[in-house]
Amino acid sequence: MTRARGAWLAAARAALFSTLCVLGALYALYASPAARAASAASTPGGDQITAAERLIFLTDHLHGVAAQTELDYALIDSAQPTHGTDVVKVLVVSPDNAKGDAQVSDHSGNVNLPIGGLQCNPAIIYFLEHDIAEMQGLTGGQRRYFQQRLRLALAAGPQIESVPSAVGGKPVSARRIVVQPYLNDPNAERFAQYTGKRYTFLLADGVPGQVVQIRTDVPGPNNDFAHPAHTESLSFQSALSKLPTPGKAVKPSNAPRASR
């Protein structure tokens, strides 16, 4: 087996977890998709990587993005409207991110993420790690528990819908995945207000980095998503191509800019 490649492609099924436990808890959380694929190939009806997992974590989202291109995303939290919008930046260092060396930063500076060798857009991992940390802080629950619930929801094979969207006022054809990881979970009664929490992933081939938006919604009373109690989103804003060395002017990109 290869070593861990990323937090969000760990084996969620109980049988594979039992196997990975002999390698320790860290491996169980960060098991590689290659190991899962090998398990599925060797065991009829074994652990399969779903289309949703493949689209979110195994797709080369940064293919076609030139070296030294910065992708900017707006991180908006409805609970902190006075703090304005934080900008999350993904710097693609090598062409197509071929070396897996894309760098992520936010208002605090550079952010180290458990990317491993995954080629997905690291903005996805950033948002999910950010969300898990918030859930841990809000509920007092264990980080591993929230990671596992989200993995299970994506491993259950949620529908991938083709939906129209718009980036910078231009129409794009997008794919949408929606999951609610805490529904029907007996442990969720400990944080009932988050049981209906919904995660929405919106991706489009025509957008640099392919991530249009990732959004979470905590419904209002009576499961009211029209008036959510809390929302948080990470949305594509712009791409700055071929960033120069310090001291040189930045050449504006022709890439689309998202409307807020």
Image: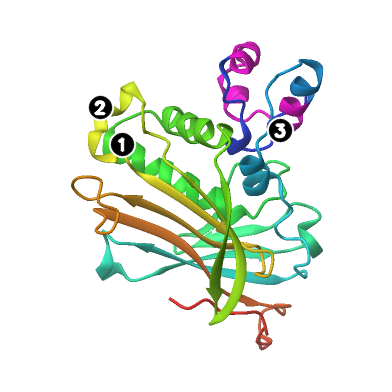
Q: Are marks 2 and 3 in contact (CB under 8 Å)?
A: no
Span of residues in magenta: 15-37
Q: Residues within 10 Å of mark 2 (few under 14, many from 20)?
A: few
Q: Which residue is mark 2?
A: 189
Name the spot of residue 180 as percent of width and height, x first.
Answer: 41, 40
Report the quarter where the N terminus lies. Answer: top right
> Going from the N terminus, do you reach mark 3 or mark 1 first?
3
* Secondary structure under the numbered disc 1 in the rendered image: loop
Foreground residue among 244 and 131: 131
Q: Report how far apart the C-alphas of labels 2 and 3 lie in the structure.
A: 31 Å
**Amino acid type at mark 1:** Thr
Q: In the image, is residue 22 above or below residue 90? A: above
Color scheme of the displayed model:
rainbow
Circle 3 crowding by C-alpha within 10 Å: few under 14, some 14–19, many from 20 = many
Query: Does residue 21 show up magenta in the picture?
Result: yes
User: Residue 158, labelled with which disc?
Assistant: none
The answer to which of marks 1 and 2 sits earlier in the sequence is 2
Q: Nearer the viewer, residue 108 or 235?
A: 235
Residue ID at (62%, 48%):
56
Q: Identify whether 5 is placed above or below 90.
A: above
Query: Which residue has dot 1 on it?
Result: 195
Considering the image in quadrants, where does the C terminus appear? bottom left
Q: Is residue 134 magenta?
A: no
Question: Which residue is under mark 3?
Answer: 33
Proximity of marks 3 and 1: CB atoms separated by less than 8 Å: no
